[in-house]
Every structure is written in structure tokens, then in C-alpha cells.
Image (cartoon, rainbow, N blue to C red):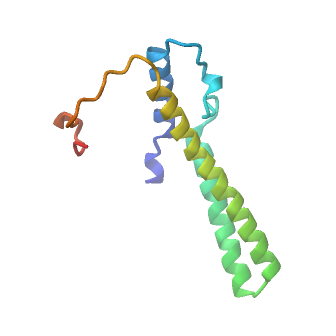
Amino acid sequence: MINDLFFELMKNNFIAVLKKKNTSSIEIDDLSIDYNGQLNEQFLNQLNFLKVHTDLLQKASTEHDELAMQSALLKLRSHAMTLSSFFEAIAEDSEVLLKMNSWPEIPEGYQLPAHYGLPGK
């Protein structure tokens, strides 16, 4: 799965939608995602930090080192919050793009065409 990260593709698609649908003064800098950053790399870095501090928590727990355990938990919380913010930015920018004016109304009972290869809801 890690080899199949898609955040850069998603970022590029968001930029394309913004350019196509933007009829107001919304700029890339007004959005939540850092469109100048490498999203796959940011995600992997935070995931790695979670792993490092999970390993630290395990070692500290084995050694009954409560200060190191507490430190690991604080770091885990911090990196988990960063990942939460990462996904919140995606949700916020999706909402901004969806609120742009020129989308057609989705009819009741709409299902994705089968050629997309996804379940229809």
C-alpha cells in the first residue's frame, strides 16, 4: 500500500478542478493543503514518526521507564494530530471545490457508470 500512495495525484486533480471550476477569487494559497509541498512525503514522514515513537513506547514499557513512556505518548499524540490535520485539509479543500458554482445537480438515485469500476453509490 505504501508504494501506491496517491496524495500527489489527488493534489494535482484538486488543482485542475480549481482551475476549471473557479469563477471567484479563490487562490491556491486560500486552500488548506500545502500545494507546494510533497504530500506523499509528508504523509510518510508522519507515519514514520508514529512508528518510531510506537517502538519507543514499547521499549520504554518493557523497561518500566515511565518518563520515556510519557514522552513517547506525547510524541504519538502530536504526530497523530498532524496526520489528523493532514486529512482535515483534504476534507476542507474538497468542500471548497464542491461549493464552486458550476457543478450539475446530482439526480436522485444516481449511480456511477460501470466503466469507472467502482461500486455505484
Residue at 49% from the left image edge and 15% from the top image edge = 22
82 to 55, vertically: above or below: above
Determine whether 71 is above or below 110 in the image.
below
**Is 106 placed left or right of 77 in the picture?**
left
Give the residue displayed 73% in from the left and 63% down from the top.
Answer: 75
**In the image: residue 65, left or right of residue 17:** right
Residue 7 in the image: x percent, y percent?
50, 40
Using the image as rendered, state which of residue 20 and residue 115 is in the foreground. 20
Work out whether residue 90 or residue 41 is closer to the camera in this orientation and state it.
90
Above or below residue 92? Residue 27 is above
Quadrant that contains the N terminus: bottom left
Instruction: Find residue 99 and report its horizontal and vertical position in percent.
Output: 47, 26
Q: Hey, which residue is sitting farthest front in the picture?
A: 108
**Residue 76 % position (x, y):** 68, 64
Most distant residue in the left direction: 114
Q: How many marks?
A: 0
- Above or below residue 113? Residue 24 is above
Q: Nearer the viewer, residue 116 or 99?
A: 99
Q: Residue at x 48, y 34 (%)?
A: 94
> Residue, x 79% and y 76% (percent of image)?
68
- The image position of residue 85, as x and y in percent, is 62, 47
- In the drawing, does residue 19 fall left or right of residue 41? left
Give residue 49's quadrant in the image.
Answer: bottom right
41 left or right, relative to 108:
right
Name the image quarter holding the C terminus: top left
Point out the residue furthest to the right here: 67
Q: Quadrant of residue 70?
A: bottom right
